[in-house]
Image: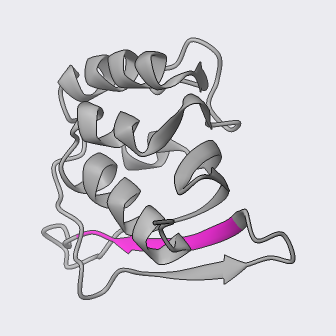
Amino acid sequence: MSRTPQQIFESYLYAGAMTRNADALAENFTADGVLEAPLMPAGGAFPRRLVGREEIRSAMAAYYEQPVTFDRSPNLEKSGYLLHTTSDPDVFIAEIDTVFDGDKDGDDPAVSLVQIFRIRDGKIARLRDYFAPGLLS
C-alpha cells in the first residue's frame, strides 16, 4: 500500500528532526534514494549530498552523534508546515516554519525552510532540503 505525502513527510520528520534516528530516517528512502542539502557548504557538518539508503544511514548517524550546539527545543504548538502537491503525483513540497522555545529575553527564534520530495513506491527517491543548519548556531 502506497503512503500519502502526509504520511511520508511525518515519518521523515519524526525519524530525523524529532528523534534523530538514522536507521528510521534511512528506511524512508528507496535503496538508491538521494538526500541533498544544496545550501550546505562543501565539507560542512551537515552532509551536502548522500546517495543510497546505506550512505544516508551511516552519514546521518555520524551527524546525529555530533554535539548539539542549539539547545532549544522546537515548540510544536507554534511551529507548522504546509504540504503542496504538484501536477506530478510523485512530487510534493513541504513548506516548514519551526519555532523554538524562547531565550531568556523571551524571543522565539524561528527557522523557515522548504523541502522538495520525489517519491517512488511510497518511499523517498530524492529529497532536496533547502535548510541551513548554521542558522541555529
Where residue 101 sits in the image (x, y, percent)?
19, 72
In this rendering, position of residue 8 left or right of residue 75: right
**Closer-to-camera residue (3/53):** 3
Q: Main secondary structure of the magenta part?
A: strand
Give me the residue at 55% from left, 22% from top.
Answer: 52
- Residue at the image point whose x is 27% and y is 50% from the top: 15
Q: Residue furthest front?
A: 1
**Magenta includes 104?**
no
Give the x, y percent position of residue 83: 59, 79
Write the residue at 34% across / 16% down. 58
Q: Count all numbered tags in the image, as a single digit.
A: 0
Quadrant location of the C terminus in the rendered image: top left
Which one is nearer the viewer's eye here, 120 or 106? 120
Establish if 110 lies above or below 45.
below
Can the viewer see residue 110 in this picture?
no
Q: Residue furthest top?
A: 43
Task: Point out the stretch of residues depicted in magenta.
Answer: 92-100
Which quadrant would residue 8 be assigned to in this image?
bottom left
* Furthest residue in direction right, as rendered: 87
Which quadrant would residue 1 be assigned to in this image?
bottom left
Residue 122 drawn at (x, y percent):
53, 57
Figure coloring? one colour
Of residues 2 and 71, which is closer to you in this image? 2
Residue 126 position within the rendered picture, expressed as x and y whole percent measured from the top left: 66, 42
Question: Going by the image, does 88 lie left or right of 115?
Answer: right
Res 57 visible: yes
Q: Is residue 128 left or right of residue 5?
A: right
Residue depicted at x 22% and y 22%: 66
